Image: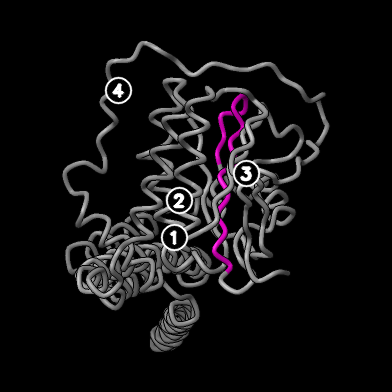
């Protein structure tokens, strides 16, 4: 009897140490990952905060013209054979509409707005509208176009490309290196979602692009000092939300690891002992990762129940038996209407959308 008690004691110590080591190693790995992975930059938060501050009443509303329109997004004639990649046109004007979805007046107004932004030194914007990108995805097509057109100046890298594939119902806005701080990916995605695609869904491509360009212009005109003040509170809320989500992810991952270790331990020391140790370890993990007492209790009891009833072992055995499957200083245009890139660079910043 004494030998049996000693044997159980040794096994319990072994399992407990194994659980503790698993918990410590998992905690350290998550801590390292959290340190190594940066959250959204302050520049992103600055821009988002300012836009939210200025647009609290209107930014998520669909344009009124759409709500009363009976138009729907329609396809255009496809000019590209299946499996082919589109050849790129030369950049000689701000807007190239190969899909022919813009009226003459829409194209003229859009180009006037783009040239005005360029003349102010804010950015050099190019727009390309095609029926389809063919075998190429919208992101790859946009990046290939941006690299060939070289929008923006080589010094400022302030180019921006809006690529639209009408039949594919895809759009991508690519931002040059110099604009990634003031037009972060999250804001570009917001512009696509709130300003552009509501019009596209109604077949109003000219109005959608115009609305997007106007929003881009407004953001480029923001006062960064005022925006920074508004960003502090937003950034704190964003960081808190990210930390809470990361805590949940870490807790669940650790719980799964503890459950697996508990399953193997149950074959050595039995269900009761392994379930008790695993339940306590899961409860401690929940507290360490900031899940709160209630959530930690639920987690610990859940693992204890799965192990004490052999349900976890049964599921694990079923899984094993079934098999797991499972350039120049700047771009420019002359009085005759020419429009060329100035050597700006793009690094993949921007966002895509669909409608």
Q: Dot 3 lies on which element?
A: loop
Q: Position of residue 261 (x, y in %)?
A: 49, 69
User: Label 2: which residue?
Assistant: 116
Q: Position of residue 40 (x, y in %)?
A: 40, 69
Few, some or many residues within 10 Å of mark 4 (<14, 14–19, 20+)? few
Left or right for 330, reference 83: left
Q: Nearer the viewer, residue 310 or 133?
A: 133
Q: Quarter-wise, where is residue 86 in the image?
A: top right
Q: Earlier in the sequence, mark 4 or mark 3?
A: 4
Q: Is residue 149 above or below residue 337?
A: below
Q: Dot 4 lies on which element?
A: helix
Range shown magenta? 157-171
User: Label 3: which residue?
Assistant: 337
Discs 4/1, front: 1
Q: Is residue 242 above or below residue 90?
A: below
Image quarter of the N terminus: bottom left
Q: Is residue 193 above or below residue 154?
A: above
Q: Dot 1 lies on which element?
A: loop
């Amino acid at each position: 009897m004494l030998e049996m008690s000693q044997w159980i004691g040794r096994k319990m110590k072994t399992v407990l140490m194994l659980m503790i080591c698993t918990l410590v190693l998992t905690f350290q790995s998550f801590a390292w990952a959290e340190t190594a992975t940066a959250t959204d930059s302050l520049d992103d938060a600055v821009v988002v905060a300012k836009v939210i501050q200025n647009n609290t009443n209107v930014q998520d509303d669909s344009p009124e013209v759409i709500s009363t329109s009976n138009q729907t997004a329609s396809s255009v004639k496809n000019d590209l054979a299946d499996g082919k990649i589109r050849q790129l046109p030369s950049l000689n004007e701000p807007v190239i509409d190969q899909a022919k979805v813009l009226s003459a007046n829409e194209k003229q107004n859009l180009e006037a707005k783009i040239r005005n932004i360029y003349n102010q030194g804010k950015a050099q914007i190019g727009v390309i509208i095609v029926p389809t990108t063919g075998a190429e995805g919208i992101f790859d097509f946009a990046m290939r176009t941006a690299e060939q057109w070289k929008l923006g100046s080589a010094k400022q890298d302030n180019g921006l490309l809006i690529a639209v594939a009408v039949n594919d119902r895809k759009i991508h806005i690519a931002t040059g290196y110099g604009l990634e701080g003031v037009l972060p990916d999250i804001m570009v995605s917001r512009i696509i979602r709130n300003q552009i695609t509501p019009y596209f869904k109604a077949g109003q491509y000219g109005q959608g692009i115009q609305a997007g360009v106007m929003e881009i212009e407004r953001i480029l005109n923001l006062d960064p000092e005022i925006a920074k003040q508004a960003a502090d509170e937003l950034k704190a809320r964003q960081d808190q939300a990210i930390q809470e989500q990361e805590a949940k992810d870490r807790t669940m991952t650790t719980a799964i690891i503890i459950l697996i270790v508990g399953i193997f331990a149950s074959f050595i020391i039995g269900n009761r002992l392994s379930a008790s140790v695993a339940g306590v370890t899961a409860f401690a993990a929940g507290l360490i990762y900031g899940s709160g007492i209630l959530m930690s209790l639920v987690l610990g009891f859940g693992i204890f129940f799965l192990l004490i009833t052999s349900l976890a072992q049964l599921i694990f055995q079923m899984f094993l038996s079934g098999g797991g499957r499972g350039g120049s200083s700047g771009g420019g245009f002359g009085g005759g209407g020419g429009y060329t890139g100035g050597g700006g660079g793009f690094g993949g910043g921007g966002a895509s959308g669909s409608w």
